[in-house]
Amino acid sequence: MKIKSKKLAYEKVLQLPQKKHKRPKKPSILFRTLMRILSEPDLRATHFKAERIGMERLGKKEPCLYLMNHSSFIDLKIASKLLYPRPYNIVCTSDGFVGKEWLMRNLGCIPTQKFVPDLTLIRDMMHALKNLRCSVLMYPEAGYTFDGTATLLPTSLGKCIKMLDVPVVMIRTHGAFARDPLYNNLQLRRVDVSAEMEYILSPEQIKALSATEINEILDEQFSFDGFRWQKENDIHLTEGFRADGLERVLYKCPHCKAEGRLRGHGTLLECGACGKGYELTELGEMRATEGETEFAHIPAWYAWQREAVRREILEKSYRMEAEVEIGMLVDTKALYMIGQGRLTHDVLGFHLTGLDGRLDYKQAPLASYSLNADYNWYEIGDVISIGNHAALYYCFPKGDGSLVTKARLATEEIYRLYYHATRTAEEEIRKKTD
């Protein structure tokens, strides 16, 4: 899938009219059926099966909030099968509307900007549930998993669910990540896919629980591990390209600690600094070609990288700098490529400069709990996206492929540290004033 792009001077992009808000539409049975039919070939190819748990509790015409984990593009096809023929709106990233707004609106999609606070989204979801009498499908992780485990959920999710006051249904997939992990350049593997659709919260339960308690329930529901699932179910992936692009996820060598020097190709991940190699086995485990295997489990390697980033932050040595190509998103007509710049990231947040000093954008560390980062985004390249309601900046780094993953890990860890410090300071002030 590609996105419509256009080269345009920065000043001209700034002069473009701001996109107007539009309320979500109720998708017609025609569009729901079309989506269902177009999804069937992939579902048949993966021998898709589903288990429904407690779904008899949901009324036939009762709107609800569907929460679904996000592993690959097949997720939406799974939802189209499980939810049909019920009408439902889909919370969708705003870049998905570029060049095809009419279609996305008629499919019932509700645009939002990833990791940008959006009160309008809550109002749109309320409109869909209460006025259109449609359910709402939401991927609260807001992005595909990098390492096959759950990404951070927003702490505001519990409050949102209490405001919506409708039943909550969880859709959990198995095999979707193994079939098409984000790092692997859209190369599909032969894997059966299944899902569980479970009624997890009634309106009565939601009223009785606090937002924090709801978040705890959702954290448990979104606890999964694609690589562990693969091994426990003895799923053998025999494709010879299974390690292609794996350096995007595993960017730090556990043997020599070099970053950005690993390269994944075929079934091997090899370090260009120390020469050590690792095989990604058919069961999804890492195995050193010689010597010790420091991390057999990919999520454990990924967690080790996170801890290393956290140490850098605490030691105030973390800093990311990259030359980038910059695209801007201000409407649904195109991604506007405005030229080159420089993106830096440290404990003070992001700083994007460029265009001979005409572009200077800063984003504070508490602006978002995570980062909109993606691999091979619309087949353009790996991307880091920052911005606000006025404009989103899509930054495509040149060279080191480790930057995107490390920047996301750092964003999350910096936010946690700042958020904890802020909450602690507020509590101290409250104690002194009581």
Image (spheres, helix red, strand yellow):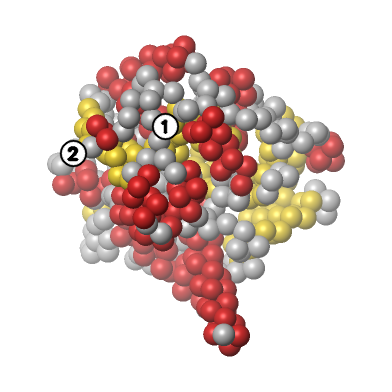
Is 227 located above or below residue 37 in the figure?
below
Q: Which mark is residue 419?
A: none
Percent of width and height locating residue 86: 39, 23
Q: Residue furthest bottom?
A: 432
- Can residue 348 be seen here? The reply is yes
Percent of width and height locating residue 224: 29, 49
The image quadrant that residue 10 belongs to is top right
Residue denoted by label 1: 63
- Residue under the point 61% across and 47% down: 119
Looking at the image, is mark 2 or mark 1 nearer the viewer?
1
Would you say the residues marked 2 and 1 are in contact, meaning their CB atoms lie under 8 Å apart?
no
Percent of width and height locating residue 55: 26, 33
Is 55 located above or below residue 402 in the figure?
above
Residue 420 vs residue 339, the one in the foreground: 420
Residue denoted by label 2: 235
Residue 55 vs residue 12, the one in the foreground: 55
- Residue under the point 27% across and 21% down: 45
Distance from the alpha carbon under mark 2 to that under mark 1: 37 Å
